[in-house]
Image: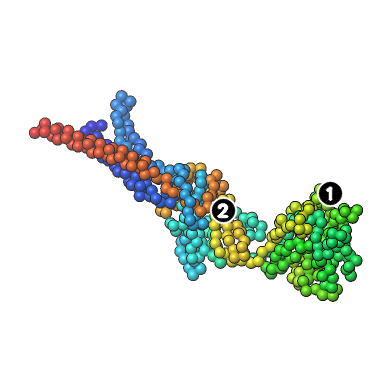
């Protein structure tokens, strides 16, 4: 390499340092861009073909180096639909190819991003600040399972949650060892028990016992309130379900502490109309106050309350005891059911399990969609697009669902471009650029000296 070769190499150096400066400038400009991944610069030497004894320093070429695998800092955000990825992974997104009267038009080609500032647009799609729409898998609100495995742009506007009929009532309570009913009198042992003799039909027979309308007053005076819960039929019609307990036998009288559970079937019953029905199970307690034998579930068949059919309902027993009580009343510890009326979507948020959860006007929080995360064999070989998105290339490998990263709701990932690091590189790049200009100045002076020899 001669004098003019040195000039060409110095110019090559200037070009490479300018390329590095451009990357540094872009990194500094995007230091506050959500989920931005800084671009580094690689320098590679270019050597002319020469024998080993004549090798000389060559030129240089600069190329970009992606940092897609470097995590940015995660910070809390005030918007519930914002999301960040902690660890490996990318969101699948799409940009609309156009719009029509129904909203944006999408094709089947997905891009990928870590920019998670998603908010619902006027059409109900989750769109980030760069205009990319989030893709995911819808979830069946009945089964809570994903509907298939194909991702598509997620839309939630005017989402409506259909009613679900009550199928299970979960119940837990402590029954007093000595129930203080209205007819209880300490001077008369057994006055706390439900006595069949006072009824036209025997209500104490498990499964078939009923209380007629004409006997309701007597029944209420010889039983205890067991709580109430609002159940729902298949159309979402609310039904007030009332429960009562009656003790029918006691160990103090030489028998076994036995209780019967009743539910109200007709609050307006008169005469021989059935007002209350026996749930169908003898609840027996031992000396320790525990169920013996144990009862886990009580099936109620063909339940109809005040003319509203509820169908078959199972009462799931969740802790039922018989301990002493100072006031002699039933202490309900658990009483809930699994039905609900229809509801309109109010808001959505992101759960820690990577699901989009909807809050409805009926008070239910239901998973609406699943947000899968994608990984690549070589994430740094993805092609960068405007807006923090990436496109699959042959060198990156295909998108693989099931990345190891975790989705963090209500948060955002910041840029991984460190200002201090970029300023350091800026100084080094400036010095290298200046040094290359000195080479050009020196080579120019030497060429001038050479020309002076001729004169």
Classify mark 1: helix, strand or loop. Answer: loop
Q: Nearer the viewer, residue 264 or 97?
A: 264
Residue 119: image x %, image y %? 48, 59
Q: Which residue is mark 2?
A: 351
Instruction: Please tell me which of labels 1 and 2 falls first in the chain.
Output: 1
At 66% across and 64% down in the image, what residue appears? 340
Q: CA distance from mark 1 to mark 2?
A: 47 Å
Q: What kind of element bears circle 2?
A: loop
- Can you give x and y, in whole percent of width and height, for residue 70 in the image? 45, 43
Quadrant location of residue 419? top left
The 10 Å Cα crowd at callout 2, few under 14, some 14 to 19, many 20 or more, is some
Q: Residue at coordinates 76% horizontally, 61% vertically from top-left?
A: 226
Residue 279 is situated, as x and y percent measured from the top left of the image, at 81, 61
Q: Is residue 106 left or right of residue 421?
A: right
Mark toward the viewer: 1 or 2: 1
Quarter of the view holding residue 420: top left
209 w.r.t. 76: above or below: below
Disc sitting over residue 287 in the figure: 1
Q: Closer to the camera, 320 or 130?
A: 320
Label 1 Cα crowd, 10 Å radius (few <14 / some 14-19 / many 20+): few
Question: Looking at the image, which residue is at 73% across and 58% down?
Answer: 332
Q: Quadrant of the C terminus?
A: top left
- Which one is in front, 262 or 452? 262
């Amino acid at each position: 390499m001669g004098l003019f070769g040195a000039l060409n190499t110095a110019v090559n150096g200037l070009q490479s340092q300018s390329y590095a400066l451009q990357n540094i400038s872009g990194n500094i400009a995007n230091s506050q861009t959500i989920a931005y991944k800084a671009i580094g610069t690689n320098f590679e030497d270019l050597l002319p073909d020469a024998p080993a004894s004549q090798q000389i320093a060559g030129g240089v070429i600069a190329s970009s180096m992606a940092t897609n695998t470097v995590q940015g800092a995660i910070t809390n955000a005030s918007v519930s639909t914002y999301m960040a990825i902690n660890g490996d992974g990318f969101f699948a997104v799409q940009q609309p190819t156009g719009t029509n009267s129904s909203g944006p038009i999408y094709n089947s080609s997905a891009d990928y991003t870590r920019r998670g500032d998603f908010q619902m647009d006027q059409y109900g799609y989750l769109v980030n600040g760069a205009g990319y729409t989030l893709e995911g898998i819808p979830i069946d609100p009945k089964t809570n399972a994903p509907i298939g495995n194909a991702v598509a742009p997620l839309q939630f506007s005017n989402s409506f949650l259909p009613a679900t009929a009550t199928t299970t009532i979960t119940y837990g309570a402590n029954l007093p060892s000595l129930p203080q009913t209205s007819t209880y009198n300490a001077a008369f042992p057994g006055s706390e028990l439900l006595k069949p003799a006072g009824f036209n039909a025997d209500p104490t027979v498990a499964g078939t016992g009923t209380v007629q309308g004409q006997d309701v007053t007597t029944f209420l005076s010889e039983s205890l309130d067991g709580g109430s819960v609002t159940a729902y039929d298949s159309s979402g019609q609310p039904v007030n379900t009332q429960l009562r307990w009656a003790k029918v036998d006691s160990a103090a009288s030489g028998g076994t502490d036995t209780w019967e559970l009743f539910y109200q079937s007709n609050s307006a019953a008169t005469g021989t109309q059935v007002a209350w029905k026996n749930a169908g199970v003898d609840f027996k307690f031992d000396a320790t106050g525990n169920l013996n034998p144990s009862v886990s579930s009580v099936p109620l068949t063909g339940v109809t309350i005040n003319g509203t059919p509820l169908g078959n309902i199972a009462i799931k027993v969740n802790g039922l005891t018989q301990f002493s009580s100072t006031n002699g009343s039933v202490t309900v510890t658990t009483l809930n059911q699994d039905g609900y009326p229809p509801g309109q979507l109010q808001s959505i948020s992101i759960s820690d399990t990577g699901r989009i959860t909807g809050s409805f006007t009926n008070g239910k929080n239901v998973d609406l969609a699943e947000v899968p995360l994608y990984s690549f064999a070589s994430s740094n070989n993805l092609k960068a697009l405007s807006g923090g998105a990436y496109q699959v290339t042959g060198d990156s490998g295909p998108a693989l669902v099931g990345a190891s990263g975790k989705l963090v709701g209500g948060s955002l990932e910041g840029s991984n471009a460190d200002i201090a690091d970029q300023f350091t590189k800026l100084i080094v790049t400036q010095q290298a650029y200046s040094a290359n200009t000195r080479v050009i100045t020196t080579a120019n002076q030497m060429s001038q000296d050479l020309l002076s020899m001729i004169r």
